[in-house]
Image: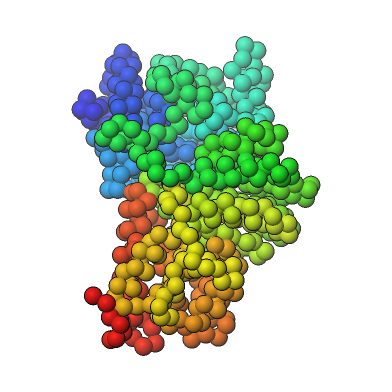
Amino acid sequence: MPALDELGGPAGLKALSPDAARRLAEDIRRSLVDTVTRTGGHLGPNLGVVELSIALHRVFDSPRDRILWDTGHQTYVHKILTGRAAGFDALRQAGGLSGYPSRQESEHDVIENSHASTVLSWADGLARAHRLRGVTDHVVAVIGDGALTGGMAWEALNNIGAARDRPVIVVLNDNTRSYAPTVGALAGHLAALRGPEPPRALFEQLGLAYLGPVDGHDIAALEEALHGAAALRRPVVLHCVTEKGRGHAPAEQDEADRFHAVRARTASGASGASGGRSPSWTSVFGEALAELGETRPDIVAITAAMLEPTGLGTFAGRYPDRTVDVGIAEQHAVTAAAGLAFGGLHPVVALYATFLNRAFDQLLLDTALHRAAVTFVLDRAGVTGDDGPSHHGMWDLSLLQLVPRLRVAAPRDAATLRRALGEAVSVHDGPTAVRFPKGSTGADVPAVESVGGVDVLRRGERADVLLVSVGAMAHACADAAERLTGQGLGVTVVDPRWVKPVPPAVVELGLRHRLVVTVEDGGRAGGAGQAIAQAISDAGAPTPVHTLGLPQDFLEHGTRAEVLARCGLTGEGIARAVTELPHPGGPMAVPARGRRS
C-alpha cells in the first residue's frame, strides 16, 4: 500500500480534497480485499467502515480526541489511517500486526479487549475523567447495532444519558448484523428509524440527542453529521447506516455472514484451515447435537449471536423452534438457560470459551446454585491462536474449578467429544460443561483400557511417570511418552475425560507412580492440574505432582501450534520438562539399568 503509507497519518488525511478522500476509500477497500484474503482476518466488518473511519479521522484529532472502537476487529481501516498500512502483509501472524487494537502498536489505539458491548462504559468513564480534570477533548465511541444487544451497553447508556455535562459522541454503526443478522426488539426499533416515518428514537427518551440516520458510505455527509454532533457538547447518538462487506461482491452476496472473517490462502489459493484431513471440533459437536436432538425433544440450543461459528447451524435447521439466539448477551443466555431447565427442558448453551468469562456470576449463582441441568459447550478453549490475548480460551478450566456442582469434560478427539456430549445432556441434577479447542480434531486416540472411567492411552513398563493428559493434549503427551520411554523411563498416559470433579481412579493411579505430571492447554493457576494435585495431596500421598500448562499471562497472537510451542506444550517440551522436574530423589534421572539408546 505505498500510496497509503505516504499519507503521514491522520494529519495528511485532513489535507485531502473531498474527491481525493473518496478515491482513498476505493484504494483502501481494494487493498483490504487483497491483503486480508491472503493473510486471513475480519474482512466484512472493515469493508463496511471504510468511509466512516476516514470521516472520523478527518473530523477529530486522534489521539488527542479519543476514538474508541467496540469489538475491535473493525479497526483495520483505522490502523491504515494511523500509519500501519505496511504491516498488513503480516496481519495476525506471530510478531506481526494484531487483528485488534493494540496499545503497543500505536498511541491511537485505546481498547485492546475485543469483546463486544464494552465501549460505551469506556467512553462514560473517560468522559467523567475529562470533566474532573478539565479536559475538553472529544470522546467518540463507535458501536455496532449487534453490540447494542449486549446488556452492558445499556448499563452505560443509562449513565451517559443522565449527565449532559459529560459529552459522549456515540457513533452507531448500523449494518443490521453482528456475525449474523441482528435479532430482537432493538433490531426492530432501528429498522423503524430507517423507515419513511420514523418514531421518536429510544435514545432521546434516555436523555441523548439523536442525529440521523446518515449514509455511512458518504464521507461528506458523515463529516457534516460528525461536526454537528461535536458542536452539541452533550451526549449524542449519530446513527450511521452501513453495509457489511461493502464493495466486495462475494461478501455483499453472502447472506450467512457477509465474509465476517476469511481464512488465509495457501500457495495454491485454497484455504489452509482444515487441510481436508479431519473434521473440525465445531462440526463434530454440531452434528452430534443434531443427532441427539432426534431422540431428546427436551434439548434446546442457545447461542449468543454466534449460531454458525459455534456449530449450531445443523441443529437450528432441523429444530428451529428449539434454537434461541439471544444476541450478544451471554449473561442473559446463561440465566435464561436456567429458566428453561426449571421449565423441564435441557438447554445446551454454545459459546466461545473466552465469552463464558462474561457470564461467570450467572453460571455460579443462577445455574449451579439452583442445580440447573444446563450443558455448556465451550468452543475454542485453550489457545486459539491468531486472534490474540482476548480470544484465548485459557481461563475456563481455572474459572470452572470454582463452581460447585459443575461437572467438566475435556474430550481428546472426535470420538470422545461425541461421548462426552451424550453423557453431559444425560445429567439432570446440575450443570455440565464440555470444552474443546479451535481447529481440526486430528486422528482419534484410542484407549488401551479403562480404569474407573479413566482412559489409559498407554501403559508403561514401570511406574515411573504418570502423564495425565487433559483434553486435546493427548497427541503431545503420547509423543512425550515415546521420547521418555526411549530414555528408559516407564511412562503411563491417562486421559480423565471428565476433569471436574477429579476422578478417584486418577488419584489411585497417581499413588502407584513415582511422579505425576499433568498437561493442559489452560492457565496453570487453579486449573485441572492443580485440582488433581490437591486431590492426590488430600489422599495423603507422598507422590509429587507437577502441573504443565500455559503461563498466567496475556499471550500474544500466533498460530495455536506456535503459542503451544512457546509455552513448552509439545511432545519435546513436555519430555524435557519431565526429565528436569525435581522430586524427592532428585531430578527424574534415567535408571542405570534399562537405559535405552
Report the label total: 0
State which quadrant residue 373 falls in.
Answer: bottom right
Q: Quadrant of the C terminus?
A: bottom left
Please report the residue visible at 52 percent of the width from the left and 68 percent of the height from the top: 449
Residue 235 position within the rendered picture, expressed as x and y whole percent measured from the top left:
55, 32
Please report the residue visible at 36 percent of the width from the left and 88 percent of the height from the top: 585
Which residue is nearer to you in this view: 473 or 184? 473
Give the residue at the far right of this rendering. Answer: 343
Give the residue at the far bottom of this rendering. Answer: 585
Residue 242 position within the rendered picture, expressed as x and y whole percent measured from the top left:
48, 22
Which residue is nearer to you in this view: 512 or 188? 512
Please report the residue visible at 67 percent of the width from the left and 42 percent of the height from the top: 293
Which residue is nearer to you in this view: 486 or 268? 486
Q: In this view of the protein, can residue 40 be seen by the observer?
A: no
Is 102 placed above or below 584 here?
above
Please report the residue visible at 44 percent of the width from the left and 29 percent of the height from the top: 259
Is 456 placed above or below 214 here?
below
Is 301 placed above or below 25 here?
below
Q: Is residue 283 left or right of residue 476?
A: right
Q: Is residue 510 left or right of residue 359?
A: left
Q: Is residue 295 left or right of residue 509?
A: right
Which residue is nearer to you in this view: 252 or 154? 252
Residue 376 position within the rendered picture, expressed as x and y whole percent measured from the top left:
61, 51
Colouring method of the image: rainbow
